[in-house]
Amino acid sequence: MISKSLSSSQCFFLAKEITRCQDYQSLTHAFIKLLEDFCWVDSVQAYEIFSGRKKRSPNNDGVLVRKFPIDFNADINADDCPLLSNRPIAKHIELLPSDNQTCLAILPVSSELGPSRALLLQGSFNEVSVELLGHLLTLYRNQVLLHDRKERDLLTRLPNRQSFEARLTEVCEFYQGLGGDYQLDDKASWIAILDIDHFKAVNDTFGHLYGDEVLLHFSQLLEYKFRHIDFTFRFGGEEFVVIVNRVSRNDAEHILNRFRQEVENYAFPLVGKITVSIGATCIQRGRLPSTLLDSADKALYFAKEHGRNQVVLFENIENVEANTDNLNDVELF
């Protein structure tokens, strides 16, 4: 355990533990572990905070939060998480009464690229411990900003391919830990690749400036139309990826088709009408991330081959391998 009084070598060790992490997820795991090692901290929970996103359930009219690391089995409500209250989150460490012996410390983390975050600490805090938490929070916040710049697309501000690979691995590990009675028709996660139809023609006709404008508006639709428990990414070029969580096969197909229609009905500046093709597959126990991506990609190519502007689930494709030889002839742009 780490005491309240730290030597210079202990402070150096804590700083090294935070700054040596290679990505945002490993950084946050390390920071949570570091905080849990203090003898005056009973528990630590981390959240990502969203506004303007769809809700999973009508539990509150305030902010929406997503727990870190992911826990699809846990429904978060205002009684469990004070971040769901309607009052604004303070910019500095805030202490809230909890019970006779302990209180709750809210450590806010704002970011210019990613969502806001906050850590909730249950424990016993005094001036010395709050001051130490302030120094550690500043260090952690700076590292979050660095990782957001590295792991997010500068144009759309969505997580990039590097973030996607880490998140997909995390989701796969979550389902790998479920019991053997898990069935495909249960609420699951689905990975979908979304490709804007004829995007090359947009660039050739209107120029790359308006092509970027299309990408920006498309990414904003992704953020606002999918729920806060779903994960959205810019995969590269005109391709995007969504991981839709805790839905059945029918619901996954409905959600993706609803977004496809939103895109089709949206008035993009100057360009006008744009459509999107979507290929998706279910994240099942035992399937590797690379296999999932390949299956979603095959479903996307199937959608392109059969007219574009549609959603295709890999699980619904018959004789996929028989169609593989024809995929090379598909005009993608």
Image (cartoon, helix red, strand yellow):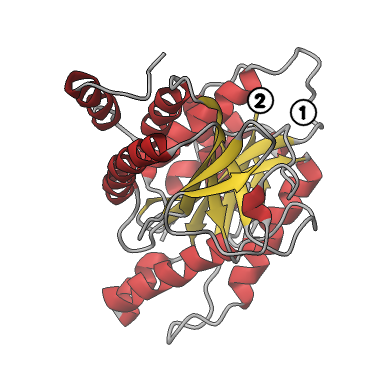
Residue drawn where x is 38% and y is 75% of the image: 213
Is residue 117 positioned above or below 28 on the image?
below
Residue with the mark numbered 2: 284
Residue 278 is situated, as x and y percent measured from the top left of the image, at 58, 52
Q: Is residue 143 left or right of residue 184?
A: left
Q: Nearer the viewer, residue 138 or 216?
A: 138
Is residue 210 positioned above or below 8 on the image?
below
Q: Is residue 284 left or right of residue 130?
A: right
Q: Secondary structure at mark 1?
A: loop
Is residue 252 positioned above or below 220 on the image?
above
Q: Identify the image quadrant of the N terminus.
A: top left
Tag 2: amino acid: Gln
Q: Nearer the viewer, residue 235 or 60?
A: 60
Question: Which mark, by number, is residue 68?
Answer: none
Tag 1: amino acid: Leu
Q: Identify the image quadrant of the C terminus.
A: bottom left
Residue drawn where x is 71% and y is 55% of the image: 255
Residue 166 is situated, as x and y percent measured from the top left of the image, at 43, 32
Q: Secondary structure at mark 2?
A: loop
Instruction: Give yes or no for contact between labels 2 and 1 (Cβ–Cβ under 8 Å).
Output: yes
Residue 129 is situated, as x and y percent measured from the top left of the image, at 40, 34
Residue with the mark numbered 1: 184
